[in-house]
Image (tube, rainbow, N blue to C red):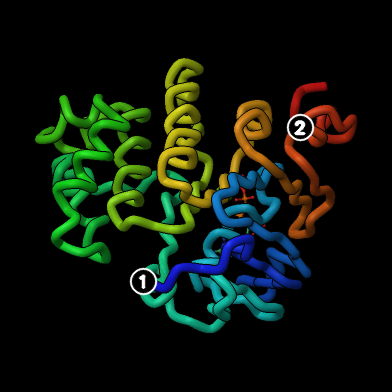
Amino acid sequence: MALPAVGAAMLEIENVSAAYGPVRALDGVNLNVGMGEIVTLIGANGAGKTTLLMTICGRPSAKAGRIKLKGQDITALPTHRIAALGVAHAPEGRHIFARMSVRENLQLGATLAAPANFARNLDRVLTLFPRLAERIDQRGGTLSGGEQQMVAIGRALMAEPDLLLLDEPSLGLAPLVVRQIFAAIGQINRERGTSILLVEQNAHHALALAHRGYVLVAGEIALEGKAADLAVNPQVRDAYLGG
Ligand SMILES: Nc1ncnc2c1ncn2[C@@H]1O[C@H](COP(=O)(O)OP(=O)(O)OP(=O)(O)O)[C@@H](O)[C@H]1O
Ligand SMILES: [Mg+2]
């Protein structure tokens, strides 16, 4: 993987539209993630957040517009090629394998990384989430929701991504676990310089962690700005921060 130029964008989404058959889910979306940046995308149920992450990964592919990764056009590439270029996705609902152990689930994320890096990458994930080290041979299906989320993020990290896509990592988790997960996301960004696009309904935590944010309403970007500015924006406060 060639090193990108300093100051270049990690991800550039230009005028992207996407649809499921006749159902339009994204309409002319513009969004950027800079190198080493955490960007959050907030929005209500059905706004199109998951669709945007999936469109970055090529399924569904964008109907219009362009998506670039480190300057390279990835709009029409198949998902496995996009992953090989350095994008990893921890999907909504986690989708870990219930009958496989924590170790096996993490191994599945490692297929794109150099085999020589496996032990080091596993060690880094288990240092980030010590709870997983304690449960390394436990089956995925018997883990708590928070532990499953740690596996989903850990599995994505095993691919050594440049861009990490996280879809509602806090969904359904207790406040203490939410804080642990958000702390880990911040740590990944600081220690590895990984660029992160974080989809969240928990706008409070997401805006506290991210550098910048976007608000998606019915498939269109309604607002964007520095996270600190969005956190005090009256529209955002009313709609996403409980007033
Ligand atoms: N596979 C699909 N087939 C048809 N329509 C779909 C499909 N997936 C999503 N949609 C529709 O696309 C729109 C956007 O859905 P999406 O899942 O992207 O929203 P979201 O912002 O992630 O919502 P949530 O916060 O509930 O996860 C919705 O109207 C949804 O019904
Ligand atoms: Mg979603």
Image coordinates of residue 200 in percent, x first then y, are 60, 40
* Nearer the observer, 212 or 174: 212
Which residue occupies the extreme bottom position in the image?
76
The label shown at residue 196 is: none
Relative height, residue 59 to residue 242 (above, below): below
Ligand 1 contact, mark 1 (Cβ < 8 Å)? no
In the drawing, does residue 23 fall left or right of residue 233?
Answer: left
* Nearer the observer, 145 or 206: 206
Image coordinates of residue 63 in percent, x first then y, are 66, 80
In the drawing, does residue 183 fall left or right of residue 43?
Answer: left
Q: Secondary structure at mark 2?
A: helix
Q: Residue at x 74, y 51 (%)?
A: 216
Q: Quadrant of residue 43?
A: top right
Dot 2 crowding, Cα within 10 Å, few <14, some 14–19, many 20+: some
Which residue occupies the extreme right position in the image?
234
Please say if the residues under marks 2 and 1 sit with CB atoms less than 8 Å apart: no
Q: Residue at x 55, y 78 (%)?
A: 72
* Nearer the observer, 27 or 5: 5
Ligand 1 contact, mark 2 (Cβ < 8 Å)? no
Dot 1 crowding, Cα within 10 Å, few <14, some 14–19, many 20+: some
Image coordinates of residue 71 in percent, x first then y, are 59, 75
Which residue occupies the extreme left position in the image?
137
Q: Quadrant of residue 53?
A: bottom right
**Location of mark 1 (residue):** 84
Quadrant where the N terminus is found in the figure: bottom left
**Location of mark 2 (residue):** 228
Image coordinates of residue 47 in percent, x first then y, are 70, 51
Q: Residue at x 63, y 38 (%)?
A: 210
Relative height, residue 202 to residue 198 (above, below): above
Q: Quadrant of ligand 1?
A: bottom right
In space, the residues marked 2 and 1 are separated at their CA atoms by 33 Å
In the drawing, does residue 131 fall left or right of residue 134?
Answer: right
